[in-house]
Image: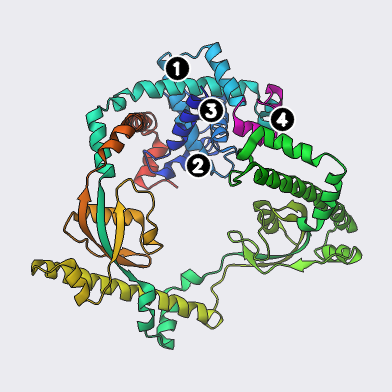
């Protein structure tokens, strides 16, 4: 049953290909519904002629959050309100359809599915439970309650997820009617192999041909000034309590207790799964031991950082000042450092900062100049406001070296692409004159690179390096056909031309062995496609006529 729950949770999260433009959903969030979205007054719309209440919406939102959690073991807090609303309305529609069709989930089936979820190894590991299953009361208190959910929300999620799976199986049934003969044809097409040679036109080979003058660099800067705009940045002072300074203390504390028992308990519960990159049990135990020591060291660092932060905030409790951080640091013999300016996207260059650190840094002001303790991957931080640097475009004089490099790089790409275009045209003429691909390469003083056999199902081709994408190669080669060369294909590095030498059918023995699983996979994929197609049409019917959607589709929405 857990396989069913997992499968459908993945299916629902996969239903994100918008059946209408994504921007429509910004008008479908609860906050906008109460602001004249589809009628004002908190109107959430209707599905199949029945109004959607605020309770309906919030229940579906909780269910989607749980579906997301069980797939990713994190909450969907990074989704925008528009993305969240999109998923909630999808779920509302599917739930209502299942109800209208009378799909019923019995108590025993729901209870069994809930039990399987609570026994999921990933959930047990996430909650650090030393048991085979997460106790229901622990699940409620540690997972549901902090999100303002309760056991009823979990039960609704389980029942509806099972009902939705039955609905998906029913509505997607036509997609499952794939014959073995059709599956064999698909397998053959995906696994027939080509042998080919490729000629790369890499920018690095043309860099020496770029003519660089001050005038050309200045013109390039003028044409690309927007690319050099610096975002809003901040600088903060910080005192770091690095975890490495507390490792010795942590080891000493563990030496007084039962470190090895804890190591063995974790290994007995998770085995090599605790650290998948560990090759042996001893290596896994060593990593577990290191992690336990590190966790205690981080906790010790947090205690000391908390004491320091209290001293900083208590220095001028009614009128905190940025310089309070440095003052207390001097009193305690600690070093206050200043970061280089950093943006919200890049973070400090001095260390790897957590999202909480960056968020706190950008929230600092002259009135609220202090923050912390903030937990990072390598330590705990207490920070203070230093300065804010607004967005700006630096003058050419300050970034000339960078602009020159960019100019030379872009020009070398253009030269490589011109050479590739010229070769592709020459190759066409050579073939027309009866010359071979190899002779054309020799005449052009180019060295083709043989590629190992590859098919549409090939997942990687190391020979390409970073000079060409695998999908670009497949598209070019399978379009060209045997005995022909592709046109010039542009890439970020320059481009390539591929010549197809031969084509071999899929191995019959391998196909026969793989066919049962492959047939099941194709049927499942077709079933999902059929269900998604139905969902798209239903969404259009139910919500496409709302005035706000018509406005958005016409480009007149605010």
Label number found at residue 130: 4
- Identify the residue at image location x=38%, y=43%: 21
Q: Is residue 367 visible?
A: no
Q: Is residue 92 magenta?
A: no
Q: State left or right for residue 459 relative to residue 314.
A: left
The part of the chain drawn in magenta is 119-138
Dot 3 or dot 2, earlier in sequence: 3
Q: Which residue is mark 3?
A: 60
Q: Which of the 4 image quadrants contains residue 498?
A: bottom left
Could you tell me if the residues under marks 4 and 1 are in contact, i.e. CB atoms within 8 Å?
no
Residue at the limit of the structure toward the right, as seen here: 331
- Identify the residue at image location x=25%, y=28%: 180
Colour scheme of the rendered structure: rainbow
Q: Which of the 4 image quadrants contains residue 463?
A: bottom left
Residue 188 vertical placement versus 437 (above, below) = above
Q: Which residue is mark 2?
A: 82
Q: Position of residue 396 (x, y in %)?
A: 51, 81
Q: Which residue is mark 1?
A: 99
Q: Nearer the viewer, mark 1 or mark 2?
A: 1
Separation (CA) of disc 4 from disc 1: 39 Å
Q: Secondary structure at mark 2?
A: helix
Q: Is residue 128 magenta?
A: yes
Dot 1 or dot 2, earlier in sequence: 2
Could you tell me if the residues under marks 1 and 2 are in contact, i.e. CB atoms within 8 Å?
no
Q: Secondary structure at mark 3?
A: helix
- Identify the residue at image location x=37%, y=85%: 211
Dot 4 or dot 1, earlier in sequence: 1
Counting other residues with Cα less than 10 Å from the Cα at mark 3, is it few (<14), some (14-19), or many (20 or more)? many
Dot 4 or dot 3, earlier in sequence: 3
Residue 221 vertical placement versus 283 (above, below) = below
Q: State left or right for residue 23 relative to residue 267.
A: left
């Amino acid at each position: 049953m857990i396989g069913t729950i997992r499968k459908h949770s993945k299916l629902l999260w996969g239903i994100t290909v918008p059946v209408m433009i994504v921007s429509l959903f910004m008008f479908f969030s609860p906050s906008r519904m109460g602001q004249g979205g589809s009628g004002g007054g908190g109107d959430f719309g209707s599905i199949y002629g029945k109004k959607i209440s605020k309770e309906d919406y919030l229940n579906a939102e909780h269910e989607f959050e749980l579906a997301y959690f069980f797939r990713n073991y994190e909450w969907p807090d990074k989704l925008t309100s528009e993305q969240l609303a999109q998923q909630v309305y999808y779920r509302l529609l599917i739930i209502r359809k299942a109800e209208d069709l009378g799909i019923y989930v019995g108590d025993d089936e729901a209870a069994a599915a809930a039990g399987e979820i609570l026994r999921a190894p990933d959930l047990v590991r996430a909650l650090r439970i030393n048991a085979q299953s997460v106790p229901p009361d622990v699940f409620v208190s540690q997972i549901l309650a902090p999100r303002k959910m309760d056991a009823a929300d979990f039960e609704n999620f389980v029942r509806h997820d099972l009902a939705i799976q039955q609905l998906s199986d029913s509505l997607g049934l036509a997609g499952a009617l794939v014959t073995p003969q059709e599956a064999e044809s698909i397998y053959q097409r995906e696994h027939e192999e080509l042998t080919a040679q490729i000629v790369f036109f890499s920018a690095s080979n043309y860099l020496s041909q770029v003519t660089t003058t001050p005038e050309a660099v200045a013109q390039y800067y003028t044409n690309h000034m927007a690319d050099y705009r610096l975002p809003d940045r901040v600088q903060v002072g910080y005192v770091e309590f690095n975890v490495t300074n507390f490792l010795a203390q942590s080891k000493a504390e563990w030496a007084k207790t039962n470190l090895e028992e804890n190591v063995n308990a974790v290994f007995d519960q998770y085995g090599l799964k605790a650290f998948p990159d560990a090759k042996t049990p001893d290596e896994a135990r060593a990593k577990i031991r290191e992690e336990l020591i590190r966790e205690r060291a981080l906790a010790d660092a947090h205690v000391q950082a908390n004491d320091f932060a209290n001293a900083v905030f208590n220095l001028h409790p009614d009128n905190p000042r940025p310089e309070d951080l440095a003052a207390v640091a001097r009193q305690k013999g600690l070093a206050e450092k200043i970061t280089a300016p950093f943006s919200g996207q890049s973070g400090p260059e001095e260390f790897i900062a957590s999202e909480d650190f960056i968020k706190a840094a950008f929230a600092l002001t002259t009135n609220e100049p202090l923050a912390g303790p903030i937990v990072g991957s390598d330590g705990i931080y207490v920070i203070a406001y230093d300065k804010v640097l607004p967005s700006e475009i630096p003058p050419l004089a300050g970034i000339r070296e960078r602009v020159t490099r960019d100019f030379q790089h872009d020009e070398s790409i253009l030269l490589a692409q011109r050479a590739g275009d010229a070769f592709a045209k020459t190759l066409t003429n050579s073939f027309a004159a009866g010359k071979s691909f190899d002779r054309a390469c020799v005449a052009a003083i180019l060295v083709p690179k043989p590629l190992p056999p590859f098919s549409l199902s090939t997942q990687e081709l190391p020979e390409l390096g970073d000079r060409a994408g695998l999908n670009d190669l497949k598209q070019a080669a399978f379009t060209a056909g045997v005995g022909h060369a592709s046109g010039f294909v542009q890439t970020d590095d320059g481009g390539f031309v591929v010549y197809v030498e031969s084509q071999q059918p899929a191995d019959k023995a391998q196909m026969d062995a793989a066919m049962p699983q492959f047939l099941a996979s194709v049927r499942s994929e077709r079933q999902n496609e059929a269900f998604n197609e139905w969902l798209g049409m239903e969404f259009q019917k139910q919500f496409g006529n709302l005035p706000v959607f018509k406005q958005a589709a016409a480009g007149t929405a605010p």
